[in-house]
Amino acid sequence: MSLSTKEKILKEASTLFSQLGYKATSVRKIASKVGIRESALYNHFKNKEEIFLTIADEIFATSVELDREKIQEEAKRGKPFLARFATTYKLVTFDKNSEKMFRLLLIELFTNEALRKKFIQEFHDKNIKLLSEAFFIMMQEGLIRSNDPMLVAYEFLSSLFYIRFHITLLRIDSESTSHLSTQMEKHVDFFWEGIKVQ
Amino acid sequence: MSLSTKEKILKEASTLFSQLGYKATSVRKIASKVGIRESALYNHFKNKEEIFLTIADEIFATSVELDREKIQEEAKRGKPFLARFATTYKLVTFDKNSEKMFRLLLIELFTNEALRKKFIQEFHDKNIKLLSEAFFIMMQEGLIRSNDPMLVAYEFLSSLFYIRFHITLLRIDSESTSHLSTQMEKHVDFFWEGIKVQ
DNA sequence: TTGGAAAATGAACGATTGTTCATATTTAGT
DNA sequence: ACTAAATATGAACAATCGTTCATTTTCCAA
């Protein structure tokens, strides 16, 4: 099924924003990609900023809320929980739309305070909270050495983020990321060897 | 001693570029901060791009080349080498000018291919190479468990970068980074416990 | 089939952009 | 003190920006 003009605008705008940034993306460029005049855009959006905000809202709206009980159950198994977390992280990293939105976020992160706050919340705080709880359970179960759960969570997450960041940079120039395709799994293995009991 | 007009231009321009990005920084804004008219700028630089390129070149020109022999000697001691690496990394992270340049890099990273290549080279490849060699030596010395040195280097570096990235984001909004001030030292402790023999 | 709403058009606007240029001022070496 | 070079000025330029508006076209429900 074909997209409505409004949807087309959001699609083309998000692509341009993620490639050029907000400032360098002109209303005329967006309209041209959609196949209409710039004045027609204003029948669908109040202004340029509203287009951007609509896209930004969409990014965070699609964030999945995880079932606390299910996590606590899974965390008791130790490494498989981390493997599953990493797999999800990897899936998102290589998903085309997620990649575009991630780039859009990073490109505007340093000039847009609201986006920055939400980014830290969604990409850091939320993950740290989830992982902390999981590591706490693993310690209770005697699966991993005792430590500050928040620190362990920070250490675990940081590598995943770095890999994603690295992959994102390489893919802009269409460079190969094959040497990084299993990096997240390797990270889980390496990490688990470092924290497990014995 | 007071700065020359050319130096003033570079100083004010780098500040603006790191705050607004290249596109949003106008020649008039730079000139205004320096205290001259925009036309006077062109007595010192060919155009806006030349100002930016001069700054970009400076960033990478100041990168320190490390003494290979000294590193190999220090790596034999194991953890103290990592502690020293982290301390240097931390120093740079909290250095005012380095922070400004790091922000400038990140803000333009996604729209400037040349910058992107140099960034990966200087901030990733170089560090990975250095750390790989060190970890290789530590394995030879029987200080740490055997593993792929590149993987261990990647794991070690990723956390440091993430901390720096996190701190950079928080400092834009003048938010407290005190809870992260010792994170790099904690990282070394945690990491060493995970890789050391026994 | 028709009428009204929705969507698209083309021209125009004021503001801002990077850059140029003729001219004026300041600076430094003799 | 004189001169030439270096530097600063103010006005102007063409291009591009986001946005508005009167008008026309398209579309769909009655």
Image (cartoon, coloured by chain):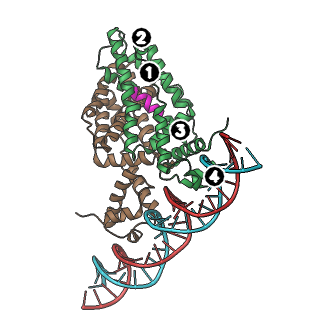
Chain colours: A brown, B green, C red, D cyan
- Which chain does the numbered disc 3 sit on? B
What element does badge 3 sit on?
A: helix
Q: Position of residue B120 (x, y in %)?
A: 37, 35
Identified by mark 2, the residue type is Glu
Q: Are marks 1 and 3 in contact (CB under 8 Å)?
A: no
Alpha carbon distance from label 1 to label 2 = 13 Å
Q: Which mark is residue B66?
A: 1
Check if mark 4 and mark 2 are on a common chain: yes
Determine whether, in the image, residue B27 is placed left or right of residue B162.
right
Where residue B27 sits: x, y (%)?
Answer: 54, 53
Q: Evaluate whether label 3 is on the same chain as label 2.
A: yes
Q: Secondary structure at mark 4?
A: loop
Q: Is residue B154 magenta?
A: no
Label 2 environment density (alpha carbons within 10 Å; few <14, some 14–19, many ≥20)? few
User: Given the current orientation, which residue lies at the most extreme left position?
Assistant: A1
Camera-nearest residue between A160 and B19: B19
Is mark 3 in CB contact (under 8 Å) with mark 2?
no
| Residue at x-position 42% and y-position 47% | A107
Q: Quadrant of the C terminus of chain A?
A: top left
* On screen, residue A9 above or below A128: below
* Whole-number angstrom distance, CA of label 3 to CA of label 4: 23 Å
Query: Mark 3 highlights which residue?
Result: B100
Disc 4 to disc 2, how far (Cα)? 53 Å
Residue type at mark 1 is Leu
Three-letter amino acid code at the position of disc 4 = Ile
Mark with earlier residue (1, 2): 1
Residues behind callouts 1 and 3 on a single chain: yes
Q: Nearer the viewer, residue A56 or B74?
A: B74
Mark 1 or mark 3, which has the lower sequence index?
1
C-alpha span from label 3 to label 2: 33 Å
Residue assigned mark 4: B36
Which chain hosts label 1?
Answer: B
